[in-house]
Image: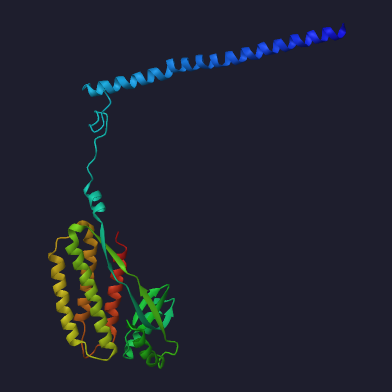
């Protein structure tokens, strides 16, 4: 009897479990369908219906609500109107071109360096008294030079003559980097004028430096250069310059003033060989340095 009851009990339990599993398999899909229908009815269908109404209103020529604007139309009173670029902004965007004034290497014979400017000037005066050119350049120290040359070979040929008076004399190389000048396309003629004149000035300096180093008279060269500089000044003054290039114009005119002063003071009878070229090269290098700072 005990065994029969156990079998009946096990059979009843098995039937109960089967009914429960069947109920779950039926109810879960039904609940999923009901939930999906509710979401579609409440959220999805109203969303698409609203989009269709908006599209129909636009195609029928209806205006959008106040405070809104259609694509391609100007905004309402509250919308900021597009601002026209100012002249400065137009000029900034117009700087689409640039030319380069090539840099150069300079070989200088240095005879002394002092913390005191007075001592440097005293040595420079001593050099002039000996018939030697002199220039003082401040580069952390007050350095005294007696020859400038665009050629290292020429400087090496002269160094022993200088060491006969100053045993510590040595060749010092200075590199002056290229400078870019920006300009707008509408002023390319003026920009080309600046480039050509600056390059010609550098060639003039090389001509004077080579002639003085060779011990030749530069009297004819001085007169020729004075005439060319006068022509350059006239061309610069007659051109119409935009405000953005005004600094370039001022700097090159400053260079011409300094060059003319050096040439005008030149006297072939009393001139110290190399002095004119040193003064001109210093002026040119200083102007290039200032031009490089123009934005």
Question: Which of the pair 56/241 is nearer the observer?
Answer: 56
Asked whether residue 202 is in view, the answer is yes
Which residue appears at 83% of the width and 7% of the height? Answer: 5
36 relative position to 263: left or right: right
Find residue 188 and report its horizontal and vertical position in percent: 19, 62
Asked whether residue 65 is in view, the answer is no
Find residue 236 and report its horizontal and vertical position in percent: 16, 67
Q: In which quadrant of the rendered view does residue 12 lie?
A: top right
Q: In which quadrant of the rendered view does residue 287 lie?
A: bottom left
Q: Quadrant for the N terminus, please.
A: top right
Where 62 falls versus 286 (above or below)?
A: above
Find residue 235 and report its horizontal and vertical position in percent: 14, 68
Q: In which quadrant of the rendered view does residue 111 lie?
A: bottom left
Find residue 3 and report its horizontal and vertical position in percent: 86, 10
Q: Quadrant for the C terminus, please.
A: bottom left
Where 252 falls versus 8 (above or below)?
A: below
**In this view, which residue lies farthest toward the right?**
1
Where 288 falls versus 119 (above or below)?
A: above
265 relative position to 292: left or right: left
Question: Which of the pair 158/272 is nearer the observer?
Answer: 158
């Amino acid at each position: 009897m005990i065994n029969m009851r156990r079998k009946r009990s096990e059979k009843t339990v098995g039937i109960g479990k089967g009914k429960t599993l069947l109920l779950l398999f039926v109810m879960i899909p039904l609940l999923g369908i009901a939930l999906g229908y509710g979401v579609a009815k409440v959220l999805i269908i109203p969303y698409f219906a609203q989009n269709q109404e908006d599209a129909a209103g636009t195609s029928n020529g209806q205006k959008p609500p106040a405070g809104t604007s259609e694509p391609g139309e100007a905004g309402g009173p509250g919308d900021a109107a597009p601002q026209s670029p100012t002249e400065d902004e137009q000029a900034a965007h117009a700087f689409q071109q640039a030319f380069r004034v090539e840099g150069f290497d300079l070989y200088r014979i240095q005879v002394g360096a002092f913390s005191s400017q007075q001592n440097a000037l005293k040595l420079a005066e001593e050099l002039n008294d000996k018939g030697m050119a002199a220039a003082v350049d401040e580069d952390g120290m007050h350095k005294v030079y007696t020859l400038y040359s665009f050629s290292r070979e020429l400087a090496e040929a002269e160094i022993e003559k200088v060491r006969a008076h100053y045993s510590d004399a040595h060749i010092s190389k200075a590199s002056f980097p290229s400078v870019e000048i920006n300009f707008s396309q509408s002023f390319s003629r003026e920009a080309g004028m600046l480039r050509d004149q600056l390059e010609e000035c550098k060639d003039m300096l090389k001509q004077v430096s080579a002639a003085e180093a060779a011990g030749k008279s530069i009297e004819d060269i001085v007169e020729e250069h004075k005439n060319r500089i006068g022509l350059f000044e006239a061309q610069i003054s007659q051109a119409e310059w935009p405000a953005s290039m005004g600094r370039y114009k001022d700097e090159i005119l400053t260079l011409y003033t300094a060059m003319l002063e050096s040439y005008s003071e030149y006297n072939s009878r009393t001139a110290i060989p190399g002095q004119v070229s040193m003064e001109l090269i210093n002026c040119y290098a200083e102007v290039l340095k200032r031009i490089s700072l123009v934005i």
